[in-house]
Amino acid sequence: MSRDKVTTTQVLACKGRQRVGMLTAYDHPTARLLDEAGVPVLLVGDSLGMVVLGFPDTTHVTMAHMVHHVQAVARARPAALVGADLPFGSYDTPARAVAHSRELLAAGADFVKAEGGREILPQIQAILADEIPFCGHLGMLPQHVLEEGGKYRIKGRDDAGRLRLLEDAAALETAGAFACVLELVTPPVARELTAVCRRMVTIGIGSGPDCDGQVLVTPDLVGGFPWFTPRFVTPRAQTGEAIRTAVRSWLDAL
């Protein structure tokens, strides 16, 4: 059954009323399956660097990679709202942020996402001034993992970290971001951010149950990358093992 295209306005209207589900998609069949399941928001995340392309982190993902995978997802013509990450190094100036955001929209994205708060506020303002919907990303920032010694650390554990997150979220909301991913934010602070942000939905990942919605890397959810599963994820299927079993069965039958 077909459904109407999801909009950012509809996502924002869910705040305080209905949880928002967001899952990653990097290819055409996955986008079709997730859309048929009713997922309202698909994210072509730069997490594809690890779970699709085999890189050690997201800093190796390029604009060419992102455009290629956004196009593949867009070919599924999903009713879901489709977002795309601006990859590492692609939004270091406002002009580059806008140019690359336009490129992702031309490939089929409905909105773009970038990591950071007040330090990238000029870029965010430029993207929004160009009438491109924007989703923020606060807390643990995967594109900055090398700067933190390669460790993924929980954010908001002390007063300074809490205040920084509150001020960054306020800046994003004031600028006009419709949503913000909160990654590895300590749950009490994620709850507080969700409460104080009235015009921006919070989408948590590893940040507790009290955000306006949740996002997961789809291979984590379905056991499609069995060599590593984040501690905060409970896989709902084991597709990796199912593939091994199917292939072994086929080989045995040759």
Image (tube, rainbow, N blue to C red):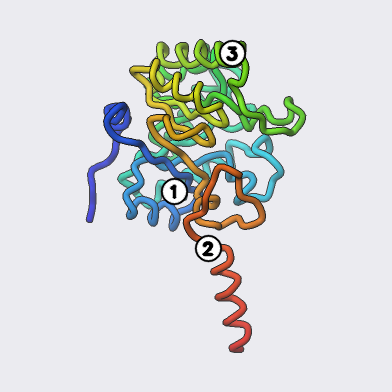
Q: Secondary structure at mark 1?
A: helix
Q: Nearer the viewer, mark 1 or mark 2?
A: 2
Q: Residue furthest front?
A: 188
Q: Given this view, does label 1 or label 3 mark the residue nearer the observer? A: 3
Q: Nearer the viewer, residue 20 or 83?
A: 20
Q: Residues within 10 Å of mark 3 (few under 14, many from 20)?
A: few
> Label 3 is placed on what type of residue?
Glu
The answer to which of 111 and 100 lies nearer the viewer is 111
Q: Nearer the viewer, mark 2 or mark 3?
A: 2
Q: Name which quarter of the figure residue 191 lies in.
A: top left
Q: Position of residue 230 (x, y in %)?
A: 60, 45
Q: Which residue is mark 2?
A: 239
What is the number of the mark on residue 73?
Answer: 1
Residue where numbered disc 3 is placed: 119
- Relative to the observer, which residue lies in front, 183 or 35? 183
Closest to the observer, 158 or 238:
158
From the top left corner, tell me how far across and down residue 190 is, in percent.
48, 24
Q: Kindly state the secondary structure of the residue where label 3 is placed.
A: helix
Q: Where is the C terminus found, in terms of image quarters?
A: bottom right
